[in-house]
Image (cartoon, rainbow, N blue to C red):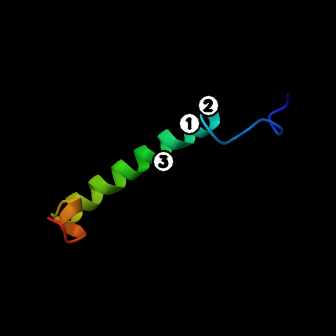
Amino acid sequence: MSDSSSSRFGFVDFAETWNGRLAMMGFVIGLLTEVLTGQGILGQIGLG
């Protein structure tokens, strides 16, 4: 099978790699936002 016909959805390496990359980006963005504003994530959305 070639890469173009293989699945990119579900629990495949391609999807898991991108899921990990996006999760790391979200964590870093959340941390930077917390440092810049002085409020936690829950405080920023009005729950804390």
- Whole-angstrom CA distance, mark 1 to mark 3, is 9 Å
The image quadrant that residue 42 belongs to is bottom left
**Residue 38 % position (x, y):** 15, 63
Q: Residue tagged by mark 2?
A: 13
How many labels sit on residues? 3
**Which SS class for mark 2?**
helix
CB under 8 Å between discs 2 and 1: yes
Taking the spot 60% from the left edge, 39% from the top edge, the residue there is 15
Taking the spot 59% from the left edge, 34% from the top edge, the residue there is 11
* Residue closest to the eye, 25 or 5: 5
Q: Quadrant of the N terminus?
A: top right
Q: Residue tagged by mark 1?
A: 17
In the picture as drawn, the residue positioned furthest to the bottom comes out as: 46
Residue neighbourhood size for the residue with mark 3, other residues' Cα within 10 Å, grouped as few (<14), some (14–19), many (≥20):
few
In the picture as drawn, the residue positioned furthest to the front comes out as: 10
Residue neighbourhood size for the residue with mark 1, other residues' Cα within 10 Å, grouped as few (<14), some (14–19), many (≥20):
few
Side of 47 where 33 appears, left or right: right
**Residue 30 % position (x, y):** 31, 56
Q: Residue tagged by mark 3?
A: 22
Amino acid at the residue labelled 2 = Asp
CB under 8 Å between discs 2 and 3: no
Residue neighbourhood size for the residue with mark 2, other residues' Cα within 10 Å, grouped as few (<14), some (14–19), many (≥20):
few
